[in-house]
Amino acid sequence: MKRVTFFIIIALALAPPAVGQTSPITVVPEPRVQADVAADFTRAGDLTLQFFRESYAVDLTRQVRIVLVPDAAAYAAAMVREWNITQTEADRRVRTTSGWTSGTTIIVNVSNTATARARIFLASHELTHQYQIQTSAPAGAWSLYWLTEGTADVIGARVIDRGGVGPMPDTKQAWIDALRRAPTRPDLGQIITEPSWFAALNAHGSGVTYRYAGMAALYLAETRGYPALIGFYAALRDSRDRGLAFQRAAGVTLEEFTTDYKAHLDRLLQ
C-alpha cells in the first residue's frame, strides 16, 4: 500500500493543570479491597494522565470515578446499581470482562488483577476509553469496536512500560505468543460493532479477541503513527462516519487496512 503521512491536530489540547489542582480521577474502593490495590489504581490514574498530556497534549476534562470491587459478584452488583442494567446483562459482562466504562464511571473487578502490572494496565485501558469518549463526543466512541478496545490496550501497554512495570517489547511478544497459540481468531471485519465483538469473545475467547484487536491498533500506530489512534476520534466527532474518520486519521481505507493487517499478522505468526 502507498504510505501517506497525516499530521492531525487534536482540537481538545489543553494545558496541564496547575500544581496542586485536584485530579479528575477519584478511586473509590469498596469494602474488602486492599489499600495497596487501591494505591496501584491511583498510581495508574496519575501515569495515564501524564501519558496523554505528554504524548497528545490532551487533558482529561471529565470527573471520573473508578469503583473497585472485590469479586465477580460485587462486580455484577455494582453494574446493576450504577447503570440500572439487568442481572442477565451484568452476568454477561462478568464472564468476559474485568472492567467496564459507562459515562464517567469505571467499575473494576480487582480479583482478576493479581499484580501491579495487571492493575495499572487495566486502569489505563479503561481510562483511555474516557479520552475516547471525550474526544469523539457527541459521536459514539465505540463506532469501530476493535479500534476502541485495541487502542485502549496499546495505551495501557505504553503506560505500564513508562511506569517501569511491563516493558513494551515483552507485552508485544506476549500478545504474539497468545495469538500463535490460539486455535481460532476473529477478523477485523467481524469485530466492528458491540454485538459482533461479544460474539467474538464467546467464539474465540476474551484473551484472543483483545490481543487480535490490540495487535491491529499497534500495527496502525507503528505504520501510520501514534497520532492516528486518537486522531480517529477527533475525525469521528466531525464526520460521524467510522469509515471516513478512519481514512482521515490513517490515510488508508478501513478495508485496505484490514487486508494489510491480516497479511502482516499471518506473516508474523508463521
Image (cartoon, grey):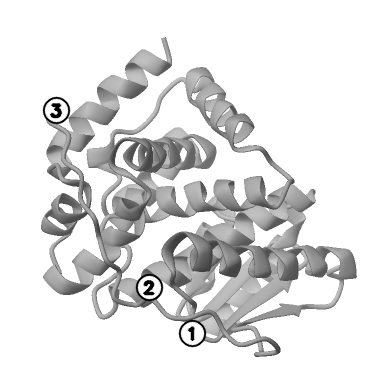
Q: Earlier in the sequence, mark 2 or mark 3?
A: 3
User: Disc 2 marks which amino acid?
Assistant: Ile
Q: Is residue 60 left or right of residue 66?
A: left
Residue 133's disc number: 2
Provide the residue designation for mark 3: 1
Q: Label 1, secondary structure: give it.
A: loop
Question: Which sits earlier in the primary sequence, circle 1 or circle 2?
Answer: 1
Instruction: Check disc 2: other Cα within 10 Å, few if <14, some if 14-19, many if 20+.
Output: many
* Residue 212 coordinates in the image, percent (x, y): 41, 35
| Quarter of the image that includes the N terminus | top left
Instruction: Tell me the distance, in whole angstroms, between the alpha carbons under discs 1 and 3.
Output: 39 Å
Instruction: Kindly identify the amino acid type of the residue bearing the numbered disc 1.
Output: Arg
Amino acid found under the numbered disc labelled 3: Met
Ranked by sequence position, the earlier of labels 1 and 3 is 3
Q: Nearer the viewer, residue 251 or 258?
A: 251
Checking the image for residue 62, the label placed there is: 1
Residue 64's quadrant in the figure? bottom right
Indicate whether 42 appears above or below 229.
below
- Mark nearest the camera among 2 and 3 is 3
Q: Quadrant of the C terminus?
A: top left
Is disc 2 placed on a helix, strand or loop?
helix
Residue shown at 64% from the left, 75% from the top:
66
